[in-house]
Image (spheres, grey):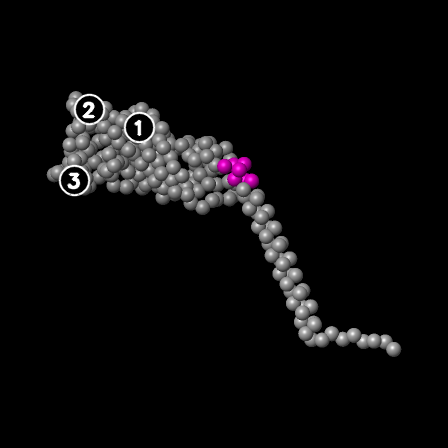
Amino acid sequence: MSQVFSKSPEHCAKQGGLTIDKSYKKLFFAFSAFLTIVLAFIFLIWLTLHPAKPQFALREADIYQLSLSGTHLLNSSIQFTLLSRNLNKKVGIYYDELQAFAAYKGQQITFDSFLPPFYQGHEESNLLTTSLQGTGLPVALSFGYEVEHDQTAGRIVLNLKVNGKLRWKVGTWVSGRYRFNVNCVSVMSFGPNAPTAPLSSNQAAQCSTAV
């Protein structure tokens, strides 16, 4: 006589649950392995390319106007030219949301001037020229005294700054946006016998860049 073995419903439910648990585990391990491979691939690309931040150098700066209206309202007109260089051999750079301004002893002395966005190819250089203006710009009451003091000392020092966002481009891949800040120091002769305008600096000066 043959024996027939039957499984209870409870036993079948346990077997089914075990199969489902194994499927979830396999799926989880497969996804984890795929994610690890992708991250390792991105990390290797980053180690291989590791983009260098762009370099900026001040080529020329001219002050056409720097005069007070009343005791603390400034009228200013400044123009400067920067050389921007991409040092990377395999990485291009998109520059977005560029704005420039001038500062004197921690005070902003022009309004923001917006530069058009542009793309910089591998090992490429670009000249950026912008005109900065300020009309009735509030400054500290000590501003006039500080300018007179610098005139007596024979020189004036300005900070010319550019802020913006950049994106790295490798092949067809483009990164997210990274904020960057450029600070250039311009030293100009400003003695009692200096011409009224413009005060000029034609000496190339390296700028500091933070990304």
Q: Name the residue beneath numbered marker 2.
A: 153
Q: Residue furthest top?
A: 193
Q: Nearer the viewer, mark 1 or mark 2?
A: 2
Q: Are marks 1 and 2 in contact (CB under 8 Å)?
A: no
Return the disc, 2 or 3, that comes first in the chain's sequence: 3
- Callout 1, which amino acid? Glu
Is residue 130 on the magenta stretch?
no
Mark 1 or mark 2: whose residue is earlier in sequence: 1
Which residue shows up at 17% across the image and 28% down it?
Answer: 149
Residue that numbered label 1 is attached to: 60
Amino acid carrying label 2: it is Ala
Q: Secondary structure at mark 2?
A: helix
Which sits in the foreground, 141 or 112?
A: 141
* Residue 62 x %, y %: 26, 29
Report the residue that reaches farthest toward the left.
70
What range is drawn magenta here?
44-50
Q: Which residue is mark 3?
A: 73
Rendered location of residue 2, percent (x, y): 86, 76
The answer to whether residue 46 is magenta is: yes
- Marks 1, 3: nearer the viewer: 3
Q: Which mark is residue 165?
A: none
Mark 2 and mark 3: Cα distance apart in space: 24 Å
- Which callout, 1 or 3, points at the residue further toward the start of the chain? 1
